Image (cartoon, grey):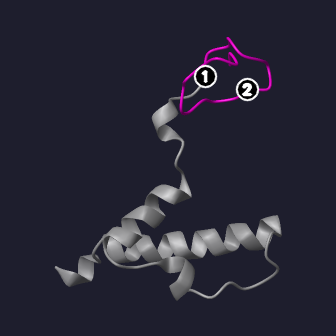
Amino acid sequence: MEPTSTTRFCAVHTNGRGIPCPWRYYNDRDVRTIVELGKAIDFDARTAIPFEGERHNALDDARYQAKYVSVIWQKLIPSQADF
């Protein structure tokens, strides 16, 4: 990125600037997308679901994310039994 650039957001690649981004930039959100959807229905999983394990341990963090993504998904998508 040029030092005089006014670009607010940029993607940094290990191969250097000038190389096109190999993925669609609008797919970058991952877990954050479903967390935002949960907040849109007034459910903040990160405060509602206690963390188990050691924080910043990759496996424990991944388990926690999987747990709260699952809970949010269940709140967003009604069960077939509800019909």
Q: Is residue 13 above or below residue 42?
A: above
Judged from this view, the residue extending furthest toward the front is 4
C-alpha gap between disc 1 and disc 2: 8 Å
Where does the image place residue 60, in percent across and percent down from the top left?
76, 74
Is 20 inside the magenta-drawn segment? yes
Q: Earlier in the sequence, mark 1 or mark 2?
A: 2
Give amino acid for label 2.
His
> In the picture, which quadrant includes the C terminus?
bottom left
> In the picture, which quadrant includes the N terminus?
top right
- CB within 8 Å, label 1 to label 2: yes
Where does the image place residue 13, in percent across and percent down from the top left?
73, 26
Q: Which residue is denoted by mark 1 in the rendering?
A: 21
Q: What is the chief secondary structure element of the magenta stretch?
A: loop
Give amino acid for label 1.
Cys
Residue at coordinates 46% horizontally, 78% vertically from top-left? 44
Is 51 inside the magenta-drawn segment? no
The numbered disc on residue 71 is none
Q: Regarding mark 2 in the picture, which secondary structure is present there?
A: loop
Magenta-colored span: 1-21
Q: Which residue is denoted by mark 2 in the rendering?
A: 13
Is residue 77 toward the left or the right of residue 72 in the image?
Answer: left
